[in-house]
Image (cartoon, rainbow, N blue to C red):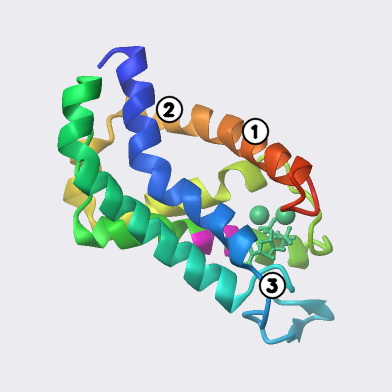
Amino acid sequence: MGPLELLVVAFWVMLPAYVPNNAAVLAGGGAPIDGGRTWKGRRILGDGKTWRGTIVGTLVGVGVAYLLNVLRPTAVDVLGVSVPTFPLAVMITLPLGAMLGDMAASFIKRRTGRNRGAPLPGVDQLDFAVMALVLTAVVAFEWFVAVFTLALLVVVLIVTPILHVITNVLAYLFGFKHEPW
Ligand code: CTP
Ligand code: K
Ligand code: MG
């Protein structure tokens, strides 16, 4: 695969993991997952991780994967790039992993004294992608190794933080987010 093809496949394959966190920002609110509970004097996750945001985010991600599967034949024709199909397990592990990665980062933030909304540079930009990849690799190992070459993984790890920064600055400017990260 050439560089442009790698970029297209990276974006295609990660889109079901990119969309959930943004959908959660739009859908968020209501009861927090930790139910307000604390551990060692600090919230377990905090008010920024809600049931509604997590469930809607995951479902929207599953929907995105489904849509990409439907669009795949057309995309292969139009783009001339062999993008993969998502098996059912992966339709779930990519968005669910993304939400869990974001949640794990909030857990770490609270344990290290950071309040809701505080940035954790590096982690904020990759938590969701790394957990989505790990969960997918664990649950659908054969699909994972068939799709992810080392080059594709490297492209994903470079492209993801760039897209994350752009998306979050835009979401902040449009008033959807409280912080631009
Ligand atoms: N959100 C949600 N449920 C999630 C993730 C996000 O409801 N699982 C919503 C919340 O309204 C949250 C907003 O999306 O405030 C922004 O998400 P994020 O930046 O991840 O949360 P923060 O509020 O910054 O909290 P934290 O410091 O824990 O990351
Ligand atoms: K976050
Ligand atoms: Mg935040």
Q: Quadrant of the N terminus?
A: top left
Estimate the spatial distance between the alpha carbons at disc 1 and disc 3, rounded to whole Å: 25 Å
**Are dots 1 and 3 in contact, CB under 8 Å?**
no
Q: Earlier in the sequence, mark 2 or mark 1?
A: 2
> Which sits in the foreground, 176 or 47?
176
Mark 1, secondary structure of its residue? helix
Q: Considering only vertical position in the picture, is 75 above or below 53?
A: above
Give the Cα distance between marks 2 and 1. 19 Å
Q: Residue at x 68, y 87 (%)?
A: 35
Mark 1 vs mark 3, foreground winner is 1
Q: Which structural element holds mark 2?
A: helix
Number of marks in picture:
3
Residue 152 locus on image (x, y percent): 34, 28
Residue 141: x and y in percent read 22, 52
Taking the image as shown, residue 141 lies to the left or right of residue 105, namely: left
Q: Position of residue 91 (x, y in %)?
A: 29, 57
Residue 45: mark in rendering: 3
Magenta: main secondary structure equals helix
Q: Which residue is found at the position 52% from the left and 27% from the top?
A: 158
Instruction: Identify the mark nearer the N-term, 2 or 3.
Output: 3
Q: Which residues are magenta?
A: 99-103
Q: Which residue type does callout 2 highlight?
A: Val
- The amino acid at mark 3 is Leu
